[in-house]
Image: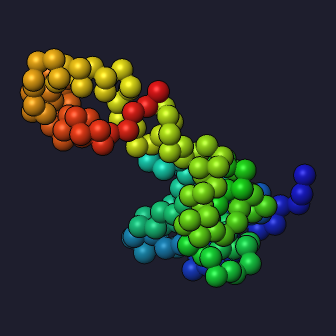
Amino acid sequence: MSEEIWKSIEGYEGRYEVSSLGRARSLDRETFYKDGRKGRVKGRILKGAYSKAHGYVVIGLDSKDKRVLHRIIAEAFLPPTEYKETVNHINGDKLDNRASNLEWASYKRNNDHARDTSLNSQHGINCNLSKFSEHTIKAVKNVAARFGLNSTEIAELFDMSETHARFILQGKTRKRG
């Protein structure tokens, strides 16, 4: 295993650092409390929080500054490049924030990589745009054709939005599975 190297987080020098192995820590420091007293805060490894919204580890540097950990590590360890739009996880694991697993990428390159590694499938059950199973779509179309129902009636019958029902009838909805 390689040696862990720590570097300061830009804008938080002397307060926070990130490591080449994908960790973050606060440093020992003096602080002032609201009542004016001076105190000492002991540094520690930051746990971070897993964000279900996008699948990345987020750390709080102060009460108003929450950031994705992989971006901070890339800014500290990766050489500057013209493609500083996104940070790609080379092995596809969003929780593996080692500097050696990160690379700068354009939006296109990052999306292509996600599709190539099946992280963002554009087809089938894993498609992030899929809403309904093939069975549901067939049932909607059959019932609409058989009974002459419009999208509003279909929506009520199948407990879906009128827009989804209309898109299914127009063949615009992706199926999953």
Measured from the top left, where is residue 150 in percent x and y?
10, 31
For the point 70% across and 66% down, which residue is it?
103
Closest to the observer, 72 or 127: 127
Q: Is residue 148 above or below residue 86?
A: above
Q: Is residue 48 above or below residue 43?
A: above
Residue 44: % across, % down: 66, 57
Left/right placement of residue 176 relative to residue 158 reads right
Q: In this orientation, does residue 30 appear?
A: no
Judging depth in this view, the residue of 95 and 63 nearest the camera is 95
* Badge count: 0
* In-front residue for pair 107/62: 107
Query: Can residue 157 be seen in this snapshot?
Result: yes
**Residue 86 image-quadrant placement:** bottom right
Q: Residue at x 43, y 75 (%)?
A: 36
Scheme of colours in the image: rainbow
Q: Quadrant of residue 45?
A: bottom right
* Residue displayed at 9% across by 23% down: 148
Q: Position of residue 153 (x, y in %)?
A: 9, 27
Residue pictured at 26% horizontal, 35% vertical: 168
Give the answer, above or below, for where 80 lies relative to 44: below
32 and 139: which is toward the camera: 139
Q: Position of residue 136 (x, y in %)?
A: 31, 23
